[in-house]
Image (tube, rainbow, N blue to C red):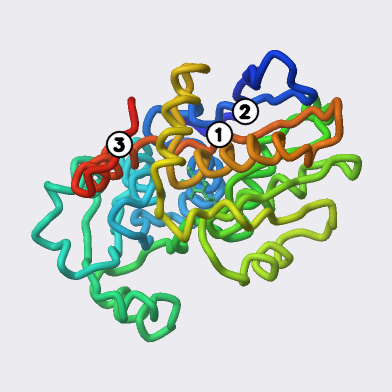
Amino acid sequence: MNFDFEHTVNQKIKISEDAKVSLFLKREDQLHAFVSGNKYRKLKYNLLEADKHGKKTILTFGGAYSNHIAAVASAGNILGFNTIGIIRGEELVSGVNNNPTLHFAKENGMQFKFVTRSAYRNKTDLAFINNLKEEFGDFHLVPEGGTNALAVKGCEEILRASDNVFDFICCPIGTGGTISGLINASVSSQKVLGFPALKGSFLHKDISRFVSRTNWELIENYHFGGYAKVDENLINFINKFKSKTKVLIDPIYTGKMLYGIYDLIDKNYFPEGSKILAIHTGGLQGIIGMNMHLKNKNMPLIQM
Ligand SMILES: *Cc1c(COP(=O)(O)O)cnc(C)c1O
């Protein structure tokens, strides 16, 4: 991985015989085998910055199934950084090998520190960070989910000039870093639609910190009850999408966004003739963990 300026393909998705809009999927999931999708974009300038300052260790934060944790561990392994993951949930300390994401991160050399959920909430406090510096020595800190100004800069590289032909650019949202990059890289004739994967009213403010344009909107009714919450409709949609297009999508981000896009198409939200570009942000590593959870709940599994 040398962080060249890279572009992924826009794959045309056949919606139906009589569809009045066209839909393309930007295959950011194919950017890298392990540092997938938007996490590659978000890490790029952060890791170049760490390298510039001679930092040997990257420390970051995440939940037990986090795509960001998997991406940081893998990128660190490839590029020669030590990596430390501060993981939410003290009980996981004995369960690393039963958790596919943590197991993968460990195999890639990540060192973990498991903290309670209440301690995790203080992760941005100076005292908490200083304690980590005492424990681990000097490190380059990447925030949870990887969002900062350098991450936004990396996400601006998702779009290329030829994407200006699209009327709508759609992407899923966690912390808002990815959509911020897309907004900055869009042209004013385009509308950027964000589909939050979680409930919460903080996103408008978070995104506004990174962007100055106003050609964007949040579509807030496709989070399925909250972060990583799913139901049978969503799982069935993901399986149907896979069998029709051969494209696997994750249930936490891209699956919810595409469910929303299809629903909005049904409701004639998009004017006739609209060209829609949806970003497949990756995150496929999380499906194994999700399927373990679905199996426990006797729900249908995601077909891989
Ligand atoms: C982290 C992640 C997102 C959310 O990106 P933000 O920049 O935090 O909004 C979307 N999709 C996938 C697959 C992710 O892993």
Residue 103 figure quarter: top left
Residue at image point 70% right, 56% down: 218
Q: Total label count?
A: 3
Q: Position of residue 140 (x, y in %)?
A: 42, 61
Residue at image point 33% right, 59% down: 63
Assess disc 2: are there few (<14), some (14-19) or many (≥20) residues with their C-alpha within 10 Å of its C-alpha: many
Indicate which label's residue lies in the foreground, 2 or 3.
Answer: 3
| Residues at discs 1 and 2 in contact (Cβ within 8 Å) | yes
Distance Cα–Cα, label 1 vs label 2: 6 Å
Q: Nearer the viewer, residue 256 or 6?
A: 256
| Residues at discs 1 and 3 in contact (Cβ within 8 Å) | no
Mark identifier at residue 280: 1
Secondary structure beneath label 2: strand
Q: Is mark 3 within 8 Å of ligand 1?
A: no
Q: Nearer the viewer, residue 31 or 79?
A: 31
Q: Amino acid at mark 2?
A: Lys
Q: Which residue is mark 2?
A: 26
Secondary structure beneath label 3: loop
Q: Nearer the viewer, residue 135 or 40?
A: 40
Residue at image point 43% right, 63% down: 141
Q: Is mark 2 within 8 Å of ligand 1?
A: no
Assess disc 1: are there few (<14), some (14-19) or many (≥20) residues with their C-alpha within 10 Å of its C-alpha: many
Secondary structure beneath label 1: strand
Mark identifier at residue 202: none
Counting residues from the N terminus, which is met first, the one under dot 2 or under dot 3? Answer: 2
Q: Which residue is mark 3?
A: 300
Residue 56 figure quarter: bottom left
Q: Amino acid at mark 1?
A: His
The residue most toward the bottom is: 127
Q: Position of residue 80 (x, y in %)?
A: 33, 42
Q: Is residue 130 left or right of residue 41?
A: left
